[in-house]
Image (cartoon, rainbow, N blue to C red):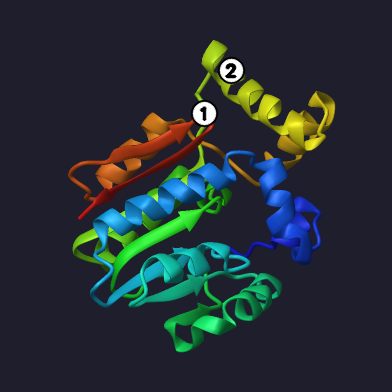
Amino acid sequence: MAHSVEGHLKLNVADYDKLIRQLVPGYAAMRTAHMALLRKLLPGDRRSVVLDLGGGTGALAGAVAETLPLAEVEIWDTDPAMLAVARERCARFGRRIRYVERSFANPLTPCDAVVAGIALHHVKDLAAKGAIYRNIFTALRPGGAFLNADTAIAGGGVLREFSYQEWVNAMAPHGLTEARARAHIANWAREDYYPPLATELRLVGEAGFADAECFWREIPFVIFGGIK
């Protein structure tokens, strides 16, 4: 399940952090909510292990390390260029952050939490995604949390178009015309799939989580997952 963000988004990896906020306008609010949830679920006064799946530039891993001062974080990513950026960004955390050049479809390290940010939508096959969620459930210790921040689009009809239009509208203040925004979305669809939230929650439940939950939403962006 190799994936290159530089090739996929046609971006220079050095510009990724700036451009992701233009292409995913809910990114900043989603990150704030993500860390607030993690802080509530994992006490900051105890050691913990957090896996960041598809961790890319290390932005999410760095936020986790700042939010949980005693946590150790593993960044799992198959893109060596992005991991190189992550190593530079996260150097100040020393050995607290580890870099794993491996697919997140593989069995995972035992941990206290699994997070992902705008990454798991690269898995288009629902059976494969369900297997990843099962691996996450298996890796988590009792009481561990799975918090996935991503995009969810309604399955069809008026609500599907509404989801996309909300995304397009949110890109406009960043200088993207509707035509350009929709061209981006159409290009990403060659590799990405944004299942409806109901489908994601079903897969999370089938993976073993008793209470699959949507923790935060600003259409079309969402944080969902569960507690083991």
In the displayed orientation, state which residue is furthest to the top: 158
Locate the C terminus by quadrant.
Answer: bottom left
Residue position for label 2: 162
Split into 4 quadrants, where in the image is the N terminus? Answer: bottom right
Say what amino acid the circle numbered 1 marks. Answer: Ile
Which one is in front, 130 or 175?
175
Above or below 225: residue 160: above
Q: Residues within 10 Å of mark 1 (few under 14, many from 20)?
A: some
Is 44 rendered above or below residue 214? below
Frontmost residue, 139 versus 42 = 42
- Above or below, 158 against 190 in this view is above
The residue wearing badge 1 is 219
Q: Marks 2 and 1, how far apart in space? A: 9 Å
User: What is the x, y in percent for residue 184?
Assistant: 77, 38
Which residue is pictured at 46% across the width and 65% down the height? 52
Closer mark to the observer between disc 2 and disc 1: 1
Q: Reply above or below: 21 against 143.
A: above
Residue 159 x %, y %: 52, 16
Q: Residue at x 46, y 30 (%)?
A: 196
**Residue ID at (51%, 53%):** 117
Camera sees residue 124: no
- Is disc 2 in contact with disc 1, using a CB cutoff of under 8 Å? yes
Say which residue appears at 61% left-offset and 80% top-offset: 87
Q: Is residue 139 visible?
A: yes
Q: Label 1, secondary structure: give it.
A: loop
Q: Residue furthest bottom?
A: 95
Q: Is residue 82 found left or right of 13 in the rendered image?
A: left
What amino acid type should be assigned to the residue bearing mark 2?
Phe
* N-term-proximal mark, 2 vs 1: 2
Q: Secondary structure at mark 2?
A: helix
